[in-house]
Image (tube, grey):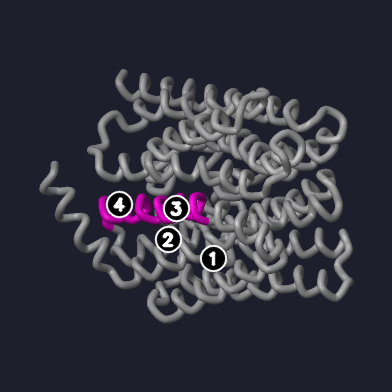
Amino acid sequence: MQDGVAVVRAPVLRSRPLVALLVAEVLSTTGSQMTWLALPWFVLVTSGSKQMALVIAAEAGGYALFGIPSGSLLERLGPQRTMRLCDAARAPLMVLVPVLHWRGDLTLPILIGIAFVLGVAGTPYGAAQRIVVAEILDEDEASVERANALLQGATRITMLAGPALAGILIAAVGAPIVLLVDAASYVVSFLLVTLFVPAARAVRADGSEDGQGLLAGVRYLLRDPLLRGWTAAVVVGDASFSVLFVAIPVLVVHHYGADPRLAGAFLASWGVGCVAGNLVAYRSERVGGLQQAVPLVLVQALPLWALAAPVPAGAVVGALVLSGIANGLVNPTLHAFLTLRPPAAVRAKTLTALFTASSLGTPVALAVAALAFPVYGSRDVVAAAAAGQLAAMSYAAVITLRYLARERA
């Protein structure tokens, strides 16, 4: 087994296009993670917690509404061109927010509209990235799995660097400057993908009925029992995570002295755990597979209850680190399974449908949170989100155990 792993690692790490993707991922998602703190903080201190949640919900709503149609765009353009289009659209949109603010022309409806279009512009990016990795590595299953693990690790690193850096920069120069840094990261990502990532073939479906139509990916998700169950769990789980992370700045403002550096540290602590988990998962032999995922998804969910309790900041950091470690350990197995399970004929549309489904609960959850924050308080909202996360992961564990039992029978 060790010999096989060694053979796989070298070409993956020596691939210039893959290295370019890794660098682009680190830069652009670091900027996005900075914005994840900077934009809510900007709205929170200028307008209030209700308006903050509405802006975040608008971006998530744009992503959810246009995610499934974006699969057809991905088929037409191919993954490399799709990634470039996403970056080229998001950079100027992000610049608009601070520019309009400095001119005194930024109103809440305009900000909500910009956030919505930003969500639309990012819809096919994740699926395009997964497909272009498969193209670069000639559809070799082992190499694709390892490359996906590396990309996920790069994303997790941004959860460490982005929020912490954002907290420092917000305190030093203000949130609008941080948004400009995010815009610059999209420009650099665009250049890296353009210069170093080959324009892979368009991901068109074959002539079979399974790959035809706008909803081909949705049909496949619904037809596959395990994908269907995990999709439902992901919808609720991701919505709960979104509320938890959006609530962190509110928690800090109301219960931890309104220090933006502490808000950044809270968000970064989950990233620390994720990176640690990804490193262990990358180094370890994959023993147990989906069976190993069952306890890990529960460990991911349970510590989040600490955020709803009146505990010291150190306890919140510890809980987020533990949850992140479990997430980092389990996600490589799950992402490899979810990516490789759909056949090539429907992979582009299935992946965009899966990414879209994962965001469907977020706009609703954030809109409800916007109304709940002033009525129930931040800790009660966090408790409801932690309950949703635990329910979703418990359901995922049950359907996975049932699937494994049928496979053994």
Of circles 1 and 3, which is in front? 3
Q: Which amino acid type corresponds to the residue marked 2 in the rendered image?
A: Ile
Where are the magenta residues, as a range?
140-161
The CA distance from mark 1 to mark 3 is: 27 Å
Q: Is residue 57 left or right of residue 287?
A: right
Quick one: SS at disc 1? helix
Which of the two discs, 4 and 2, labels the residue nearer the N terminus? 2
x, y percentage for residue 278? 37, 44
- In magenta stretch: residue 146: yes
Spatial separation of the CA atoms under disc 3 and disc 2:
22 Å
Using a 10 Å C-alpha cutoff, classify the residue at mark 4 as few (fewer than 14 neighbours), some (14 to 19) or many (20 or more): some
The type of residue carrying mark 3 is Ile
**Looking at this rendering, what residue extends furthest in the bottom direction?**
195
First of labels 3, 4 by sequence position = 4
Q: Would you say 22 lies left or right of 43 here?
A: left
Q: Upstream in the sequence, badge 4 or badge 1?
A: 1
Which SS class for mark 2?
A: helix
**Three-letter amino acid code at disc 4?**
Arg
Determine which quarter of the picture holds residue 242: top right
Residue 170 in the image: x percent, y percent?
A: 67, 59
Q: Mark 2 = which residue?
A: 131
**Residue 146 — which label?**
4
> What distance separates the C-alpha of mark 1 from that of mark 2?
10 Å
Label 3 environment density (alpha carbons within 10 Å; few <14, some 14–19, many ≥20): many
Label 1 with label 2: CB-CB less than 8 Å: yes
Front residue of 263 and 147: 263
Write down the residue under mark 3. 157
Element under disc 4: helix
Residue 387 lies in the magenta stretch: no
Dividing the picture into quadrants, the one containing residue 335 is top left
Task: Kindly identify which residue carries mark 1.
Answer: 74
